């Protein structure tokens, strides 16, 4: 998505209010942003007495297929940006479990830099509610095996194992 040539992969970015992208620029590749990570505001699927809770869902950081750049520092920069958004919104950030160590380091750095209490980082398995948007098109390699699909009704994902950052004062992850 984003560097694809097919319109159905880019359409959700244009038409879906919950779907944004964090872009990465690199001076080695001045043509256009060279990296991107899809970033969405989603909600947990409420169960029983538990109401739905907001999640800032961050997908993998990818680079333009043609660019010859070192993308190793990008994950930390993107996590800093996403954690800042989570702090500002008071919403938990959800990332791939393989980034847990990097996310924990980012959370410590942000707390030390601000002289504040650090939020919590942990692993959990949860389902998300995918509410239809006015754009009616959704695209993700992580939320569904459909990849690109027309979404007219609410869908609930299978439980997914994720690493969750809960900002201080956000009320926990459950």
Image (cartoon, rainbow, N blue to C red):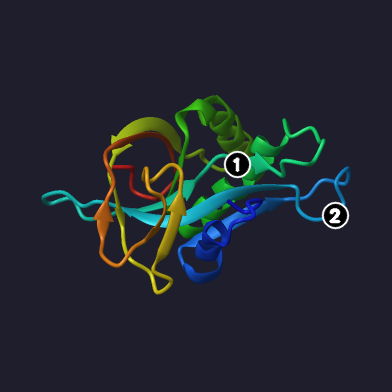
Residue position marked by numbered label 1 in the rendering: 79
Horizontal side of 101 relative to 47 (left or right) equals right
CB atoms at circles 2 and 1 under 8 Å apart? no
x, y percentage for residue 118? 51, 38
Q: Which element type, helix, strand or loop, lies under badge 2?
A: loop
Q: Is residue 72 above or below residue 43?
A: above
Horizontal side of 98 relative to 5 (left or right) equals left
Q: Is residue 153 among what the camera can see?
A: yes
Quarter of the view holding residue 114:
top right
Residue position marked by numbered label 2 in the rendering: 31
Quarter of the view holding residue 121:
top left
Residue drawn at 64 percent across, 35 percent down: 109
For label 2, the crowd category at 10 Å Cα-Cα, with few meaning under 14, some 14 to 19 and many 20 or more, is: few
Figure label count: 2
Residue drawn at 58 percent across, 33 percent down: 108
Residue drawn at 21 percent across, 55 percent down: 51
Q: Which comes before the other along the chain, label 2 or label 1?
A: 2
Q: Foreground residue, 6 or 155? A: 6
Horizontal side of 45 relative to 43 (left or right) equals left
Residue drawn at 26 percent across, 61 percent down: 154
Q: Foreground residue, 168 or 2? A: 2
x, y percentage for residue 66? 77, 41
x, y percentage for residue 36? 65, 48
């Amino acid at each position: 998505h984003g560097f694809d040539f097919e319109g159905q992969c880019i359409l959700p970015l244009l038409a879906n209010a919950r779907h944004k992208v964090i872009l990465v620029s690199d001076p080695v590749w001045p043509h256009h942003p060279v990296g991107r990570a899809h970033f969405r505001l989603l909600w947990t699927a409420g169960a029983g007495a538990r109401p739905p809770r907001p999640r800032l869902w961050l997908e993998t950081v990818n680079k333009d297929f043609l660019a010859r750049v070192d993308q190793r520092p990008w994950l930390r920069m993107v996590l800093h940006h996403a954690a800042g958004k989570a702090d500002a919104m008071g919403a938990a950030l959800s990332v791939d479990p393989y980034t847990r160590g990097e996310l924990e380091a980012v959370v410590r750095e942000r707390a030390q830099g601000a002289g504040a209490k650090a939020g919590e980082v942990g692993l959990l398995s949860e389902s998300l509610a995918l509410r239809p948007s006015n754009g009616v098109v959704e695209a993700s390699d992580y939320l569904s095996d459909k990849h690109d699909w027309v979404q007219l009704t609410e869908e609930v994902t299978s439980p997914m194992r994720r690493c969750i950052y809960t900002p201080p004062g956000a009320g926990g992850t459950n």
